[in-house]
Image (spheres, rainbow, N blue to C red):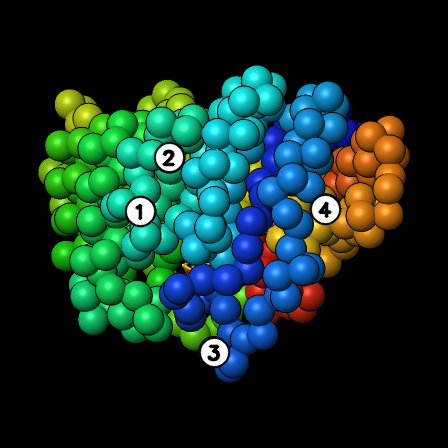
């Protein structure tokens, strides 16, 4: 469905939980966090109904996120049920990877197409500091299990923080030379937590990668599931680097997504507080037509763009990233 700015809204990012086994400093506030009650979270049956209705309005791509989606029980069966609808052409997952090893093969068999795994640094101490309670080796095992299961292409999400070191860049360069993996650097967004300093800007990272890789990074074609990232490649490398720049060079004019929070709010834009409650009508007996009308309302409410820049500080977005579904 086209919005008022000629953008085709066909992509739904669903947060299946606000809970997480990590507490990344840029994503969650450091102080004690109150999780949503189970009763407030949309059930898988409710989510399937919404996916069915929205797919009738043109949604054909779904990403499951959170919080950490793999902490929610039954996710594999849920993915199989989405696949079983026969209406979604691309199902992907964003995860911190730590719980993936025993699940990866089953997720693939259930119909999961692709996975994005967050890995900001390969220094165990920096990783522990950024994630507060994560262990680097668990995420590394998760990445290996995703590749072994054929969840292709595996993409890594690297938030640009002050933890990014020359050793990290050398690791990522070797990785993309040798594996068909996409390593995507994401600008630190002022939403969620303020527990780390922003890292280098993307121009600097691109220059450092060229120095470490000993070759020029050339703009490259698309990587499956191509979203807002701009991709670059070294000649002869199997993988690619992506740069996601929501702040310095935002991609709002190509934004094709809506978000659904775990507690049933449609969020037209990550960087705007506006939300449309769909859980109350859903639980109150709304017809498919009424639910579709709320989908139209969320599409119509998508702003043309956001106005954040590096100097914006940390505005109030109503929720942390882990509560919205990054
Ligand atoms: N727990 C999963 C994970 O970490 O991949 C999925 C949820 S997490 C909120 C989704 C993505 O948002 C991750 O790649 C994470 O690094 C990114 N993210 C969280 N807070 C961010 C921030 N302040 N700026 C940029 N990216 C952020
Ligand atoms: Fe959890 Fe992902 Fe947020 Fe880290 S980025 S706290 S892993 S939801």
Regarding residue 248, the answer to whether it shows in the image is no
Q: Residues within 10 Å of mark 3 (few under 14, many from 20)?
A: some
Locate residue 256 relative to residue 63 in the image: left or right: right
Q: Indicate the quadrant where residue 213 lies.
A: top left
Of 17 and 215, the residue lying toward us:
17
Quick one: label 3 or label 2, which is nearer the N terminus?
A: 3
Residue mark closest to the camera, 3 vs 1: 1
- According to the picture, the residue beneath numbered tag 4 turns out to be 266
Label pair 3/4, CB-CB below 8 angstroms? no
Instruction: Give SS at disc 3.
Output: loop
Q: Which mark is residue 30?
A: 3
Q: Please report the residue visible at 86 percent of the width from the left and 42 percent of the height from the top.
A: 285
Q: What is the secondary structure assignment of the residue under circle 1?
A: loop
- CA gap, disc 2 to disc 4? 26 Å
> In whole angstroms, how far apart are the C-alphas of marks 3 and 2?
32 Å
Tell me which corner region of the image, top left, top right, bottom left or bottom right, holds residue 314: bottom right
| SS under mark 2 | helix
Mark 2–mark 1 CB contact (< 8 Å)? yes
67 relative to 171, above or below: below
In three-dimensional space, the C-alpha distance between marks 3 and 1, rounded to whole angstroms, equals: 25 Å
Q: Residue drawn at (78%, 35%), measured in percent from left and top?
A: 295
Q: For this rendering, which residue is in front, 161 or 149?
A: 149
Q: Earlier in the sequence, mark 2 or mark 4?
A: 2
In the image: residue 252, left or right of residue 76: right
Disc 1: which residue: 100
Quick one: label 4, few (<14), some, or many (20+) residues within 10 Å? Answer: many
Cβ atoms at labels 1 and 4 below 8 Å apart: no
Where residue 47 appears, as percent x and y from the top left, is 65, 40
């Amino acid at each position: 469905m086209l919005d008022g700015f000629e953008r085709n809204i066909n992509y739904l990012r669903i947060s299946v939980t606000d809970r997480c086994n990590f507490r990344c400093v840029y994503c969650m506030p450091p102080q004690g966090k109150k999780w949503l009650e189970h009763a407030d979270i949309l059930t898988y049956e409710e989510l399937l109904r919404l996916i069915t209705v929205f797919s009738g309005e043109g949604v054909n791509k779904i990403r499951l996120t959170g919080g950490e989606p793999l902490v929610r029980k039954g996710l594999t069966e849920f993915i199989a049920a989405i696949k079983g609808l026969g209406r979604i052409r691309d199902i992907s997952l964003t995860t911190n990877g730590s719980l993936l090893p025993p699940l990866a093969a089953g997720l693939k068999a259930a119909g999961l197409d692709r996975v994005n795994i967050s890995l900001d640094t390969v220094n165990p101490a920096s990783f522990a500091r950024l994630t507060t309670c994560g262990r680097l080796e668990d995420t590394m095992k998760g990445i290996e299990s995703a590749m072994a299961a054929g969840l292709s292409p595996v993409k890594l999400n690297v938030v640009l923080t002050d933890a990014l070191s020359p050793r990290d860049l050398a690791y990522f360069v070797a990785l993309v030379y040798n594996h068909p993996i996409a390593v995507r650097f994401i600008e630190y967004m002022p939403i969620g937590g303020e527990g780390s300093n922003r890292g280098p800007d993307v121009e600097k990272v691109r220059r450092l990668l060229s120095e470490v890789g000993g070759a020029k990074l050339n703009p490259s074609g698309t990587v499956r599931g191509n979203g807002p990232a701009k991709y670059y490649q070294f000649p002869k490398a199997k993988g690619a680097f992506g740069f996601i720049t929501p702040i310095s060079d935002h991609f709002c004019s190509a934004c094709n997504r809506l978000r659904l929070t775990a507690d049933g709010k449609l969020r037209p834009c990550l960087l705007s507080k506006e939300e449309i409650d769909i859980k109350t009508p859903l639980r109150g007996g709304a017809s498919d037509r009424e639910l579709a009308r709320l989908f139209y309302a969320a599409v119509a409410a998508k702003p043309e763009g956001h106005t954040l820049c590096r100097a914006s500080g940390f505005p109030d977005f109503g929720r942390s990233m882990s509560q919205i579904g990054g």
